[in-house]
Image (cartoon, coloured by chain):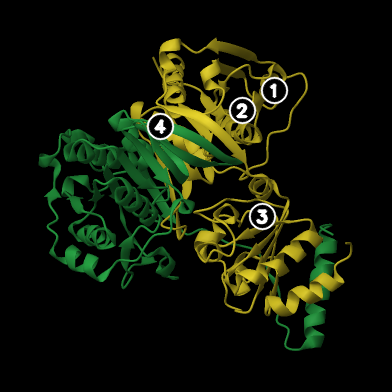
Chain colours: A yellow, B green
Amino acid sequence: MQHEGVWILAEQSHGRVQRISHELLTRGIELASKRGTTLTALILGNNVNQDDLQGLIDRGADRVVAVEAPQLESFLPQPYMRCMLKVIEDYRPEIIIAGATSTGRTLMPLVAIKANAGLTADCTVLDIEEGSGNLLQTRPAIGGNIMATIKTPNNRPQMATVRPHSTRPAEPASGREGQIVRLKAPQELLASDVKHVGFSPNVEEQALSDAQRVVVVGRGIKKGENVELARRLADKLDAAVGATRDVVDRGWLSYPHQIGLSGKTITPQLYVGLGASGSIQHLAGMQTSEVIVAVNTDPEAQIFKVADFGIVASLFDVVPVLLEKLPGK
Amino acid sequence: MRIIVPIKQVPETNAVRMDEATGTMIRDGVEAIVNPLDLYAIELAIQLRDQHGGEIIAVSMGPPKAAAALREAISMGVDSGVLVSDKAFAGSDTWATSYVLAAAVRKIGAFDLVICGERATDGDTGQVGPGIAAFLDLPVISYVSKFDSLVQGACRVHRLVENGYELLEMALPGVLTVVKEVAAPRLPTLRGKQKARKAEIPSWGAKDLDVHADKLGLAGSPTRVVKIFRPSVARKCVKHVPTDERTLNEAVDGLVGFLRGKQLI
């Protein structure tokens, strides 16, 4: 039997479909149309909200396959892996796209190994090769210094992850029809050597990923106590605070604030970089921001190459004046 | 406890410069270092061994010069190192790399934990840690931010996820991949460096491992790199270079006007 169809791995939390699923649909719609095939959303969970499943159809999926069991309520590597492998065996998808989330980044490599599939992480561009129909997966490589286009010529399925917030979520269209298949996960697939004991939420971190405005602190901030200045600007702009790797390595802000290849990717409406030089590894996490403003003393700093508006000056000179001139609070 | 730490030697990517004319990397003079994110795995392993006893074995797949990475791990406090090196491994993607490293881990023998860095700073996939777990049929917890405790054949750890921290328990043996928050890596000691210099580092090739030739290297890799190119960054930056208070005021006024024009304020 041939492998056919584009699939996305939708994610749920407490039975509610998460935003990443809709972002993946944006990618999936384009790939399925180029490949001339159907788009299916796979979701693993328990009692997933029916309206949310219909929402996946409304946003472009032709079919939703929900695999459900109490043990699948939140991500556990072994049962999720076995259930996904079973779905691959039964449905034989040609392409599977997942979010580069804590779940996707863990589940996809487990499944790819077991399914003998090719997997490419953190793709920024996905396309279909004319003629062969292969999935072309483009991602930053070698610390983001170059881009590499990767394909999986022989093995199926072709698997890839894409960063959250790297595309807009697909919009719902009313009157779309599709099939919703709810499957009960077989008991023998559900054993787990890992179990959930507890959870402590971190609201600030979530805020950064979803923020529409972000003020980012780079090494130019010089001292941990100076971060306060950036916070004041962030308050005034109604923005979240992010940091470069240098700042996190020095302990001036915690790791969840880190933006870049080894941290978070953000796509806010407004990015304001204060004393961030724009190392390639940082650029990889922010250059898709809609509007980029940079303040840095070094006129040659890379950040100015991706910025829309730059001021070559010390942030300690610029920010106080800016705080005065900005309207509001 | 017996702990295996797979590590990778990587180029110091911050130092990598691009050749503007050819668009290729200038590797000359770029130092090879232990993947910075592996240092956190090494540190956690050392803390666990010092607390519970046992030994730590670092294993690295790479060219012969990757032995230097193993020596660095030993200088930090790791007990021994194994190099996994063979021309047949060249061109391995994450699938083929996980396959070989899993075979090496199996050959090292009984262990309680495999602890990996979250990802390598050159490849940046984060796929090999879970990949090793898949080949070994072992449980894995990724993004471990804190090691809580060992309890009756299991470990309790915190896992960093999008909206907080999960507290999880995993039956041993198993695989952990750790993020920066897990520990602060120590520096090599003088005594450690002496030990590292003298350490014998065995090198295992394909024939030393229980592996199939057709699953190695490029031939065993499902993925192929078909094109390499430079990312294009094309934005026109309006750049102000203030030299005194007046021009600074103008620059900030310009910025406020710009933000207003974009309807951001």
- Tell me the subunit letter for badge 3: A
Mark drawn on residue A289: 3
Mark drawn on residue B170: 4
Q: CA distance from mark 4 to mark 2?
A: 23 Å
Q: CA distance from mark 2 to mark 3?
A: 26 Å
Location of residue A152 in the rendering, given as x and y in whole percent from the top left corner: 38, 36
- Tell me the subunit letter for badge 1: A
Please, what is the three-letter code of the amino acid marked with disc 3?
Ser
**In the picture shown, does residue B187 fall above or below B37?**
below
Quarter of the figure with the C terminus of chain B:
bottom right
Q: Are marks 3 and 4 in contact (CB under 8 Å)?
A: no
Q: Are marks 1 and 2 in contact (CB under 8 Å)?
A: yes
Q: Is residue B229 left or right of residue A166?
A: left
Location of residue B239 in the rendering, given as x and y in whole percent from the top left corner: 70, 75
The part of the image, by quadrant, that contains residue A63 is: top right
The part of the image, by quadrant, that contains residue B112 is: top left
Q: Nearer the viewer, residue B237 or B265?
A: B265
